[in-house]
Amino acid sequence: MDIHINQHQRPFTGSSSQIREEGESEATQINQLPDELDETHEEIDEEYLQARIRVFRKRQRVMLGLSIFVILAAFSMNTLDTGKVEVSWFPQLPIPELCGSRAIFGVSCPGCGLTRSFIALADGNLAASFQQNRIGWIMALTLIAQIPYRIYMMRQPPLSVMDLRWPKWFGTLLIAILIGNWLSKALI
């Protein structure tokens, strides 16, 4: 009887007990590989892990920096009576329309009003913030919560956290809330 294990091995002619014996001897040989290969494998795993941690920490720093920038920008801007936004140290020089949907098509997008909502919150005007975007306060709280969260994650990136799926789910939830708010505003 001819048995082919795979195309790279020679055919074996013999009984099942001989096949079992040959398989056991190959397993013994594999278990007796030099320790150098195990060490090399461990070094590669350690290098890969360290590279993942570096990328993870870099992402945390970038997100922390963006969060701080947006918060500081909200405190340094004003909303004009025309609805446009200006930087407080460049009075009467409005920032161009940032929403591509509104600028090109004249249609508000789900995020329209968030900048003005953040500015109103920075000024302490909750009513104006709610008027600009009804969920601006939720987004602002999420943005503020990024600061302690990102600092914690930079200091101790537990390996199990690097693979967490909840940040993606949370981001998806925020986008769904934005779209839901936009749809309810468009339909009402």
Image: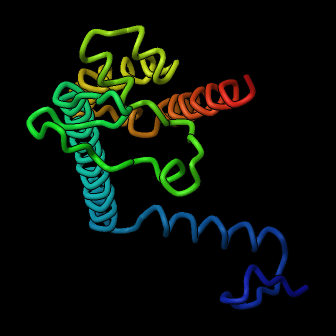
Badge count: 0
Q: Is residue 63 above or below residue 18?
A: above
Q: Is 57 placed left or right of 7 in the picture?
A: left
Q: Is 131 placed left or right of 77 in the picture?
A: right
Q: Is residue 41 above or below residue 8?
A: above
* Render colour scheme: rainbow
Which residue is painted at 49% across and 23% down in the image?
A: 133
Q: Is residue 119 above or below residue 107?
A: above
Q: Is residue 33 above or below residue 140?
A: below
Residue 39: x and y, percent?
Answer: 27, 60
Furthest residue in direction left, as rendered: 89
Which residue is painted at 28% across and 34% down in the image?
A: 157
Q: Is 76 placed left or right of 96 in the picture?
A: left
Which residue is more in the foreground, 52 or 87?
Answer: 87
Which residue is painted at 33% across and 67% down in the image?
A: 37
Q: In which quarter of the image is the C terminus?
A: top right
Which residue is more in the foreground, 143 or 42?
Answer: 143
Which residue is painted at 31% across and 51% down in the image?
A: 52
Which residue is more in the foreground, 23 or 106?
Answer: 106
Q: Is 163 placed left or right of 23 in the picture?
A: left
Furthest residue in direction right, as rendered: 1
Residue 87: x and y, percent?
Answer: 18, 37
Location of residue 23 by image quarter: bottom right
Residue 80: x and y, percent?
Answer: 29, 30
Q: Quadrant of the N terminus?
A: bottom right
